[in-house]
Each structure stands twice: as C-alpha cells, then as structure tokens.
Amino acid sequence: MGRIQMLNSYIDNLTMLQSLNLIDQAVSDGKHIHHSVVNAGKIVLMQKDVQLRESVNSADLINADGQAVIWASKLLGKPLKERVAGIDLMENLVELAHQKGYKIYCLGAKEQVVSKVIEKYKQNYSKDIIAGYRNGYFSKEEEPGIAKDIAESGAQILFVAISSPKKENFLYENRETLKVVNFIMGVGGSFDVVSGLVKRAPLWMQRSGLEWFYRLIQEPKRMWKRYLIGNSKFIFLILKEKFKK
C-alpha cells in the first residue's frame, strides 16, 4: 500500500473500500492491525507532541480523516485518493462484523452514551456481535487492567471513543496486551453521533470539507479554539511546506 509523509505524519493512500478489505483480511487471517487517523488538528498537535506523533506513526494503518488533509496532499504534490472518515469506517466495520460473525468492543464516552450505542447495535444487528463495552472515564493506573479485560473479552475489533491524544496513547502504550485483538482503532467522538447525542453534518457539508464548521456551530465554546486556531495553524504549516526553499 502506498504511504506518504506529510508534516511529520505518515498517511496511507487508500480508499475506504481498500481499507475495509485490508482490515477484513487481517481479521479473517487472525492478524493484528493497529489503526489511526489524522486530520488537520491532529497534525498540528503532532508537530510538538512527540508522544502523540510516535503513537500515531507507529500504527500499521493510518487514514486521512479530514478533507483538509486531502486538499493539502494535492497541494504538496502527494495526492491522497480520498478521505476515510473514522466514523464511517467504524460503521462499515460494525456492518462487517454482523456479516462475518466478528465481535466488537466499545470503549469510551459517558456511560449513558456508550450503553445507548451498544443497545442500538444490538437492535440493528445482533447482540452476538458485542464482546463488551466500558465508559471512557478511568485513571492512568486503571489502563493496564482495562486493556487486559478487552484482550480477554474475545473481541476481534476494538473501538476507542476518547479524545486525542489520550486514545492514541492508550492504544500505543497497551499495544502488546491488545495484540490478541485483530483490529484496534480510535474513533474520537463517534459514539456521541451514533447515540444521537450529537448530530452529524449534512452529507454536502461533509463532502465540501465543512463538517468542522457544522461542529463549531453546534458547540462554539468547546470547539472554537480547536477549529479556528487549529485550522489556521494547519494552513500556515502547509503553505510553509509548499514554499520552503
């Protein structure tokens, strides 16, 4: 698979379908894939956060979750095929789990949110795809025990819905324990969307790269710094890279 390097981040040049096929094959063959995604905000954080950079770049599969990253790759002459949004990949994998008899584990969000996600998946698919779940509120000292519980749950797919950089570092630091799980990925705030707590942007906004703006309108106090300042820094980094001598 083609992999590019952009602003201290590795990104695999794969479509959604190619990513799904790669993951399906790994689960089917009993292999392990540590997955990560990058977007504009995370790439900005990775410039100074060395631990986050190592946690992301050590992943076996890294998708571009953010239209700004796709545009930037083209501007820098390293065009990526398409955006592979983490939430879309997660939903496709839940469908795949139902079709193939795989089991999933959901870690993250508030208790009422993650339990609602589990109930929705049980209703829409089957209780048989659920290996277990846990909310995302725990201390650093509890992490090894939680990773052990996940490893012993029989799950083949793990979704971690915790904010960055905690989810990336959790997966990286507990990678040895979690190697028995065939596919592990961070999914950020995806559980909030699946549960209905947060509404996702209309499809036209997703495709035009305005999903961030929709989130900003929904939660301006929490999101303004991440998107307005983060996106401005990302644009600056891209232009600097484009025109450096």
Image: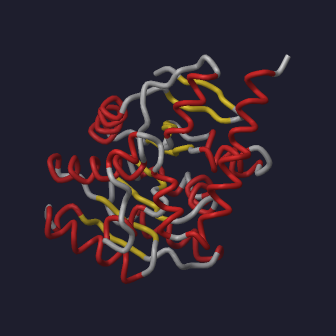
State the residue at coordinates (50%, 71%): 146
Residue placed most toward the observer, 229 or 112: 229
Residue placed most toward the observer, 200 or 38: 200
Q: Position of residue 108 (x, y in %)?
A: 46, 70
Q: Is residue 58 above or below residue 172?
A: above
Q: Position of residue 226 (x, y in %)?
A: 64, 59
Q: Is residue 187 above or below residue 241?
A: below
Q: Position of residue 83 (x, y in %)?
A: 43, 36
**Screen quadrant of the C terminus:** top right
Residue 26: name its quadrant: top left
Q: Is residue 211 left or right of residue 167?
A: left
Q: Is residue 159 left or right of residue 11?
A: left
Q: Position of residue 72 (x, y in %)?
A: 60, 30
Q: Is residue 178 above or below residue 33?
A: below
State the residue at coordinates (66%, 29%): 6
Q: Is residue 191 left or right of residue 64?
A: left
State the residue at coordinates (49%, 39%): 67
Residue placed most toward the observer, 70 or 175: 70
Figure colour scheme: secondary structure
